Image (cartoon, grey):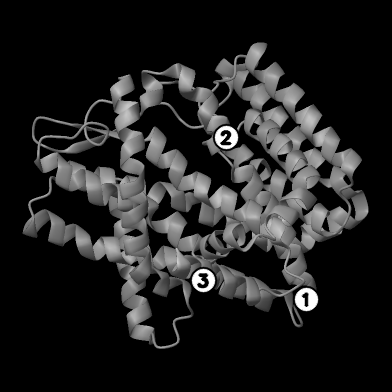
Amino acid sequence: MKALRATARRIEAGTPAHRDRAIDGLRALALVAVPTGHWLLGGFTRSPDGALHNASPLSAFGGLAPASWFLQMLGIFFLVGGYASVLSFRRHQGPAGTWLRGRIARLGRPVLGVTAVWAALLPLLHFGLAVPGDTLRTASTLVVQPLWFVGVYTVVTALTPYCVRAARRLGAWAAAPLLGSVAAVDFLRYGPYADAVPSWLGVLNVLPGWLFAYQLGVSWGEGRVARRHAWGLLLGGAALFAALLVWFGYPASMVGVPGEARTNSHPPSLLVLALAAVQSGAAVLLRERIGRLLRRPALWAPVVVVNLSAMTILCWHQSAMLAAAVPASYAGGAAGLVGAPDSVGWILARLAWLPLFAGLLVLIGRYARVFESPWTRAGAVRRAVAGVLAAGFAVFALGLA
């Protein structure tokens, strides 16, 4: 305990006075929600040949869907991302392209690292340790799933200069056209003419769906989101969320449920934007309270640690869960780890596994965080090899190999 207190004091002493602790705290909260949600709502079944397959407790326990409303915090992540980006963009001296390349490199290195490592592991696990091919495909899919966010986030980051212009002209209302765009596409997808609409139309929601909260964050960073706007987002978003659930038949779960015809998250539906509006309004209203709370060194220290390991957490948390599940599959299964997630006992057992997953993530992160640092010693050949490995892994994970 003394060592932890000393570490917290060192972090507190090294924090600049101008640091916006509330923004860092919100980002850390959204980051922690990602692995927590995946670990709680993702399970495995074991086939007769010993292979692992994805399963979800939401298939058996539809009443757990409201938990996804609190665990799906990508609205907060894009909000604070937009806020931080506009401040960084404002401080940057030089062409916008230079700023963007630096942001992309920070996002791309950890993604390239995790996919290259997994590409090297696949033949070792299959031929050396006889891990079933279906298990490896399940594992690869789980590793890739969180990484879609990086691609979308890169695109919205590239739009920062345009978001700034929109924020300066329209303020908080700059996000309204994005909401309207998603509403229009949803009407076509789920309205009276849905049978005549091609299935790919939902893809049109991907960019405006996630840009919505990012644009709000940019407007916030530009000082154009007042408390009255925050209350409007909170109350208006809550009313829209309730209406979509009660009268328009939107699925209650914010994540995909196996066997369900509709999903809110891939691509984002209007319900996702309603939730993002609620989260954004609450974040703006609670900012000062959060900032005061994080003046306590014991609370501030973990926020700093999480933020310094942001991409490591996003890229490697599924690997931590797999590091426990794959060995368990050889033992025939383990309650809450490998086995049908269809009982209360499974839920209680899965909660008990969470500390192990967290410990494995910390262990992996000790070595994986190197991918977040600039690759000053990596030559062109090494980078090319890493790129080829990453591409090969992506092809395998997407089922094209």
What crowding class fits label 1: few (fewer than 14 Cα within 10 Å), some (14-19), or many (20 or more)? few
| Disc 2 versus disc 3: nearer the observer | 3
- Of residue 238 and residue 146, the one placed in the foreground of this image is 238
Whether 366 is drawn above or below 76: the answer is below
Residue 401 visible at all: no
User: What's under tag 1, amino acid-wise?
Assistant: Arg
Instruction: Tell me the CA gap for discs 2 and 1.
Output: 33 Å
Instruction: Tell me the CA gap for discs 3 and 1.
Output: 30 Å
Q: For the point 80% across and 28% down, which residue is it?
A: 236
Write down the quadrant of residue 394 in the picture.
bottom left
Q: For the point 85% across and 54% down, which residue is it?
A: 167
Image x and y of residue 222, in percent: 85, 59
- Of residue 220 and residue 303, the one placed in the foreground of this image is 303
Write down the quadrant of residue 205 in the picture.
top right
Q: For the point 90% across and 39% down, which residue is it?
A: 228
Q: Residue 91 carries which label?
A: 1
Q: Residue 70 carries which label?
A: 2
Q: Which mark is residue 7?
A: 3
| Disc 3 versus disc 1: nearer the observer | 3
